[in-house]
């Protein structure tokens, strides 16, 4: 979305912000205990292992929570837009905050099935989510 500042892609988060170039949503995971870590950290918060690395996830999930922003806080950012917390399919505790695209804000609901799409912004690929078509969801 033009007008919004870009995220600061640090070493730990670089894979998350660049995996979209290959169509991959990359989330850090502990190789020792299997815990998904988002936001990414270099040490597992459960077992303190250093064997943490990004892994691709399915990119599917559901809307856990959301809000519709109708206030134009920045002059170049059109409103309304939907900010959502997405619960990823890999683990109910694995959630990320993002924007929803391709949906009328009035149609958004808790539990809405979604999948990742990527928007390029300079060298970064922002993971956004869009509703899964009914026929696609049946697969």
Image: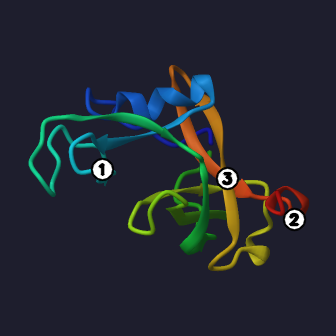
Q: Disc 1 or 3, which lies upstream in sequence?
A: 1
Task: Locate residue 110, reporting x and y percent.
Answer: 62, 79
In the rendered structure, find residue 134 and report the number of the disc placed on it: 2
Residue lying furthest right in this view?
135
Q: Disc 2 or 1, which lies upstream in sequence?
A: 1
Circle 3 Cα neighbour tier, 10 Å, few/some/many (<14 / 14–19 / ≥20):
many
In the shown orientation, is residue 102 left or right of residue 30? right
Mark 2 residue element: helix
Q: How many marks?
A: 3
- Whether residue 104 is visible here, answered yes or no, is yes
| Image-quadrant location for residue 136 | bottom right
Circle 1 Cα neighbour tier, 10 Å, few/some/many (<14 / 14–19 / ≥20):
few
Mark 3 residue element: strand
Task: Name the residue tied to disc 3.
Answer: 115
Most foreground residue, 138 or 11: 138
Task: Locate residue 131, reporting x and y percent.
Answer: 75, 60
Residue lying furthest front in this view?
32
Residue occupying image coordinates x 23% and y 51% = 33
In 3D space, how far apart are the residues under numbered discs 1 and 3 (Cα atoms)?
A: 23 Å
Circle 2 Cα neighbour tier, 10 Å, few/some/many (<14 / 14–19 / ≥20):
few
| Image-quadrant location for residue 114 | bottom right
Task: Name the residue tied to disc 1.
Answer: 34
Q: In the rendered image of this protein, does residue 128 appear above or below residue 65?
A: above
């Amino acid at each position: 979305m033009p007008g919004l500042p870009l995220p600061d892609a640090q070493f730990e988060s670089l894979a998350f912000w660049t995996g979209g170039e290959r169509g991959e949503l990359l989330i850090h995971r502990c190789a020792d205990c299997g815990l998904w870590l988002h936001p990414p950290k270099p040490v597992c918060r459960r077992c303190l292992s250093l064997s943490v690395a990004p892994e691709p996830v399915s990119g599917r999930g559901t809307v856990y929570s959301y809000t519709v922003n109708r206030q134009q806080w920045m002059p170049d950012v059109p409103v309304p837009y939907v900010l959502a917390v997405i619960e990823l399919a890999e683990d109910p505790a694995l959630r990320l905050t993002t924007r929803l695209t391709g949906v009328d804000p009035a149609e958004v609901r808790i539990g809405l099935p979604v999948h990742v799409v990527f928007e390029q912004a300079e060298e970064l690929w922002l993971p956004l989510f869009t509703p899964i078509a009914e026929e696609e969801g049946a697969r």
